[in-house]
Image (cartoon, helix red, strand yellow):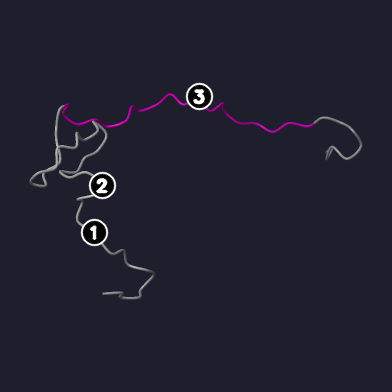
Amino acid sequence: MDDGASGGHASIGGTWFTGHGRPSRTFPNGRVCGDPGCETKLSIYNDGDYCYLHEPQSVPRMRGKKIA
């Protein structure tokens, strides 16, 4: 086996990454943030009911440690 140290060329098997595959999930167009008074249009890729600013905060679990 040639490790390339002597100037030889070696290759390994694999598949090309094309970026094609299952398309991203989309949601209805024209939705707005659910917060009263906020007129921010939500992206078709945002599955929530609120924009980033008004999305309720959630605290993640950190490997067995209870934060809240």
Q: Is residue 3 left or right of residue 41?
A: right
Q: Earlier in the sequence, mark 3 or mark 1?
A: 3
Circle 2 crowding by C-alpha within 10 Å: few under 14, some 14–19, many from 20: few
Q: Residue at x 17, y 45 (%)?
A: 50
- Whether residue 56 appears in magenta in the rendering, the answer is no
Instruction: Tell me which amino acid carries mark 2.
Output: Tyr
Residue 59 place in picture, x, y as percent: 28, 64
> x and y percent of residue 28 in the render?
16, 29
Real-space Cα separation, disc 2 to disc 3, in angstroms: 31 Å
Residue designated by label 1: 57
Measure the C-alpha gap from mark 2 to mark 1.
10 Å
Query: In what element is the residue under mark 1?
Result: loop
As helix, strand or loop, the secondary structure at mark 2 comes to: loop
Residue ID for mark 3: 18
Residue 37, by quadrant, is: top left
Question: For mark 2, what is the residue?
Answer: 52
Q: Position of residue 21 (x, y in %)?
A: 40, 26
Q: Is residue 12 magenta?
A: yes
The number of numbered discs placed on residues in the rendered structure image is 3
Name the side, left or right, on which 13 lies relative to 45. Answer: right
Residue 57 lies, with reference to residue 11, above or below; the image says below
Q: Which residues are magenta?
A: 10-29
The image shows residue 9, relative to residue 56, as above or below, that is above
**CB of mark 3 within 8 Å of CB of mark 1?**
no
Quadrant for residue 43, please give it: top left
Q: Is residue 65 above or below residue 61?
A: below
Q: Nearer the viewer, residue 32 or 63?
A: 32
| Furthest residue in direction front, as rendered | 37
**x 19%, y 50%: residue:** 54
Of discs 3 and 1, which sits in the foreground? Answer: 1
